[in-house]
Amino acid sequence: MSKQATRNFATIDELAVSGKRVLVRADLNVPMREGKITDTTRIERTADTLRELSKKGAKVVVLSHFERPKGKRVPELSLAPIAKAMAEILKVPVAFANDCVGPDAESVIAKMKNGDIVLLENLRYHAGEEENDQGFAKNLAKLGDFYVNDAFSVSHRAHASTHALAQLLPAAAGRSMEAELSALANALGEPQRPVAAVVGGAKVSTKLDLLGNLIKKVDVLVIGGGMANTFLLARGVQVGKSLAEPTLVDTAKAIDKAAKERGCEILLPQDVVVAKEFKAGAASQTVGTGSVPADGMILDLGPQAAKAIAARLAQCKTIVWNGPLGAFEIAPFDAATNTVAREVAKLAQSGKVLAVAGGGDTVAALAHAGVIDQFSYVSTAGGAFLEWLEGKELPGVAALARGRI
């Protein structure tokens, strides 16, 4: 469906890795409960890169952080359990070093044979990691011949392993990073038009930068969730006891005005689902947006709004999605998100649109709708995805673009 956007970064195709030590920055900050990993998605997403480098005869040295030990060695925040999980997923042995720099790391790496994979201990055991310390980055660089960043999700941080290190060794994007950057470039960098953005979530205040950037980039902006209530207020529509930000009405008006001047159409709901309380089984009704009861809360977009949004999106060629349209965690307030997400999934599967989504609540909402594998690309990056949508430069990505091969 989409054309391939121009790349300004190297990939592992351009590295002659056989017999070389390749430092791979992965994001293995996986959720754990009582010492057991509850979701291995992040390990699986970097598995292709690790397998490919290993098969090409590289000595693969994996770097990652885990949680926030704040520069101290905290035993319960060790990456050791993750090495075992990696071995199970990759179906090859994964050695573990008790530190990420110094003698422990050096001795384990010195014993590696071509194709071996080693995981080093938590980068954030050293304060230099989050401080983007040049000295710490140089100590990491001593351990490798090449640097590969396969962790888009942490590339909005200017840390030693994502920023400084990329400028000390020949640098390239891993397969997961490459896929993410290509999808994002095709979505907003050099998109096929018309382009639509679906933006939901609770508050306008958390997404001012996002909205300000999108109205310059897209042809259609669908606003849902609690954010839509503030925009309805700005248009003179009463929203009862709904979540809204009255102090941002003037801001919403300004965004509305700027969008019109730029030819960006903002879609707000013409009907909504309201209830007197937000809980499972609460009595609810669908009303026009001009008929919200004074004691009612808008908890979802109505069926007519969902139908209208789906129809408008079907006229587009590129769709970017961030945030649910309603309080999807509790039925029946998941209906609009489910309806629109399933329609977008069909469009993506048919090749009619490029559909790219991301952000924590978005991933959960698409999984809830049963379509997370049917979009063109779903980013699990959270903060990095949001900052990219806001048009901000991501230090880890910028460092890759400036990397040398």
Image (cartoon, rainbow, N blue to C red):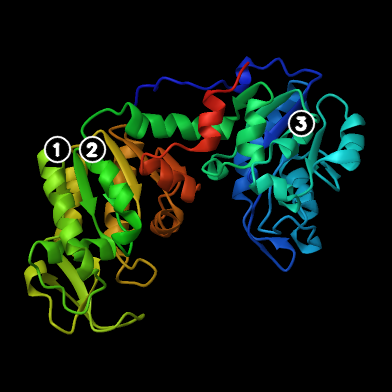
Q: Is residue 216 visible?
A: yes
Tell which tag, 3 or 2, sits nearer the viewer.
2
The disc labelled 3 sits on which kind of residue?
Answer: Val
Q: Secondary structure at mark 3?
A: strand
As displayed, is residue 319 above or below residue 241?
above
Location of residue 104 in the rendering, given as x and y in whole percent from the top left corner: 90, 42
Q: Earlier in the sequence, mark 3 or mark 2?
A: 3
Q: Secondary structure at mark 2?
A: helix
Q: Secondary structure at mark 1?
A: helix
Q: Earlier in the sequence, mark 1 or mark 2?
A: 2
The disc labelled 2 sits on which kind of residue?
Answer: Lys
Q: Are marks 1 and 2 in contact (CB under 8 Å)?
A: yes
Location of residue 237 in the rendering, given as x and y in whole percent from the top left corner: 9, 68
Q: Which mark is residue 157?
A: none
Residue in the image at 27% along x and 66% along y: 226
Q: CA distance from mark 1 to mark 2?
A: 7 Å
**Residue located beneath label 1 in the image:** 262
The disc labelled 1 sits on which kind of residue?
Answer: Arg
Q: Nearer the viewer, residue 194 or 215?
A: 215
Residue 96's quadrant in the figure? top right
Q: Earlier in the sequence, mark 1 or mark 3?
A: 3
Q: Nearer the viewer, residue 210 or 135?
A: 135
Q: Which mark is residue 60?
A: 3
Q: Which mark is residue 216?
A: 2
